[in-house]
Amino acid sequence: MTVMKTSMRNFFAHKGRMALSAVAVLLSVAFVCGTLVFTDTMNTTFDKLFAATSSDVTVSAKGASDTGATTSDNGRPPVMPASVVGKVRAAAGVKAAEGTVFSTSVTVVNADKDSLSPSSGAPTIVGSWNSNDARTMKITSGAAPGNSGQIMVDADTADKHHLKLGDELAVISAVGTHTAKISGIADFTVTNPGAAIFYLDTKTAQQALVGQTGVFTNVNVTAAAGVTDPQLKKNVTAELGSAYKVQTAKETADANQKDVESFLSVMKYAMLGFAGIAFLVGIFLIINTFSMLVAQRTREIGLMRAVGAGRGQVNRSVLVEALLLGVVGSVLGVGAGVGIAVGLMKLMGSMGMHLSTSDLTVAWTTPVIGLILGVVVTVLAAYLPARRAGKVSPMAALRDAGAPADARAGRIRALVGLVLTGAGGYSLYLASATEKAKEGSAWLGLGIVLSLIGFVVIGPLLAGAVVRVLGAVLLRMFGPVGRMAERNALRNPRRTGATGAALMIGLALVACLSVVGSSMVASASDQLDKTVGTDFIIQSDSGQRITPQAVKAVKDVPGLARVTEYRTTTADYTTPDGKTLKDTDITAANPSYATDLRTKTVAGDLKDAYLPDSMSVYDKFAKAHNIHLGSKIAVKFKDGRTAHLTVRAITSSDGLIDAGSKYTNITTLAKYVPAAKMPLDDLVFATAKDGRQDAAYKSLKSALHDYPQYTVRDQTDYKQALKDQIGQLLNLIYGLLALAIIVAVLGVVNTLALSVVERTREIGLMRAIGLSRRQLRRMIRMESVVIALFGALLGLGLGMGWGATAQKLLALQGLKVLEIPWPTIIGVFVGSAFVGLFAALIPAFRAGRMNVLNAIATD
């Protein structure tokens, strides 16, 4: 009971200092709980959505995916004849059956040809209005489409793009462009997952999406009373045979949920990883807090030992304080986590994915995980300071506060740190020297962990050298105040090292990712410059294939030297080693593609791969299947006949663009695949005549004005698009890493605040002999800046080393250019100085307000 009373008294006596550490625990726990609540809520939302939108049994074409979103190579959804509906209705246990048509390979634009597709990456869906959709959509304005001139839009899309009844829209599919005016607006009765949904009448949907009437993509089947979904599926399958895909509502929902879960899992574990980094940084803050509190209470602990307190009691006293800190921080963190989840839901709503707070899901495991994590991490972090407190002897009551550091322990720490750092550096060297990416990744991971731990352990040793250099460069110009700031930072290297290490972790990851991201962009740009011999690339950013009409429009542009079509499909291969490879990719292009992409060959000439009944393969594929020049491969084309193609070129896998592709001529593909089944182009390349690039660029954009689903890019545009994509990903990661940096800033604040308290008498004496308040505040700010820059130097140096090693592994995948983003690195370093200034504001202000006489009288 005495231990508990002592712990409670000390906890509340230092509540201001504990509050900063509690915030670190709170933020870390909040991020974990917020992630769990958010992903659980997303799962609940989609579970309800898929359960509500799935009919009892769904029949779809054989080529459709489990989610029904598959589009054929010709840009149209797989269909089945309308006669299937009659057969389904004849099956036992069927109450109703309704044929529907829908497609996700569409673009919808307004009168200004602006796309109405979601910016969140959710699909654009155009389909026929049917009774199954009427279960989840309520018409709030106008009416459902009744003829070819009418279209209905979901309310969220209408609000976002300011659409109203009577506005003209255009539905662009592989079939062509269909225009209609908005006849109705329908609101979701379930949560909108962010998709843009448009409805046509059934006949118009068939013509606009498939190009023919009398066909459906799905048949929605409703069970009669007392008939289970599995039984209904069995009856329908018995009626139709195996020619079609038949799924129960649960199977459809599970397939859709599986697609969602794959995305959610990546997001969930990524966010939890960043929460783990914040926890790691928080550990340093907690260790620092309790180490300084123990040092400041050395005489007090010595007195307790002198009056009979045992080592175990002192140890438990500090651990109980940590337990209280962990409980308070964790409880608040769980509550804040729910708030973070709601904030993430609002953020998703601004991006078009509307999540209702009524679906907010807080599983009982979430607060339990948060509490256990927060308490365990806090108590473990406080263990070393608690153990140090237990070793304080009764004689410490006769000495000044702040027992001297154990020199032997410091030497052991330095030795361990050097060994770990050396082992980490050697692992990074092995990673950079490996020839196999998988093996190198393992060495890279080990090297990152060992070097990070090594730098943390060796931090106090490095602090002395680095702070002296920083002091000589930055602080000496401020005269005696600058020298005092330097000495204060050097006074306790262990504390300075731990504080700098907290900042080091976050900045090391920032530097590493910056190097990797910049190297990826630079490598891709280099590959484009070296291998792409065409001026313009035409493609759809939404994944739609390019229609023959659009290809013709490109070919009609004046000033072009050549136009190359590029399309992909799949085939079943029978290779010389007797193996059959199902659904293997093959790329068909015009012979000019051998000029448009300067692909390195290891045998033969790539131009020969475009001869009749010829093809190329890449070297790893050839080696795996005993393929040589002149070998014949039986290729059973999807939706076509079997061709026996002669291998006339073997390309190198050592590249970034189109690595691993197998090429043949479009005319060869057309010989074995019926015209109606021929795949559309994925890309079209255009090359201008010499000196006419600018004019051709403008003419191409003008020619495709009526095809807003396609984008024309020159090489500069393409590089910028790539840079923007990687930049968006890095910005998201930097945003998540900001949590760790915020916790690190709290660590600097806490260290300075406790340091000021520790030096109360010293500050009073300095003020008494003439140090002004302004000089005092400046001294503390400069001390903070030096500590922050120390952490930044370690972190940025370590991160650049990690990034350079990671780039060596990327080089095995064709990303061979190492680029250090110096503007980012320098900006982060300079920003760290401002972080130090910000962290010192409150401690410096409090130090400046100290009463001189009271400070001198402090024991």
Image (tube, grey):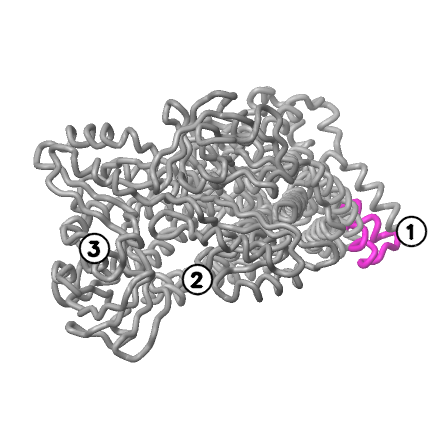
Q: Which of marks 3 and 1 is in front?
A: 3
Does residue 277 show up? Answer: no
| Residue for badge 3 | 666
Residue type at mark 1 is Met
Instruction: Name the outermost residue toward the bottom.
Output: 578
Which residue corresponds to mark 2? 422
Provide residue 194's location: percent of width, then percent of height.
54, 37
Which labelled disc corresponds to residue 1?
1
Q: Which mark is residue 107?
A: none
Q: Which of 36 and 540 is in front in this view?
A: 540
Give the number of the mark in front: 3 or 2: 3
User: What is the residue that sits farthest to the left in this orientation?
Assistant: 690
Majority secondary structure of magenta residues:
helix
Relative depth, front residue between 304 and 175: 175
Helix, strand, or loop for circle 3? helix
Residue at 39% across / 44% down in the picture?
212
Q: Does the magenta stretch include residue 112?
A: no
Whether residues under marks 3 and 1 lie with C-beta atoms below 8 angstroms apart, the answer is: no
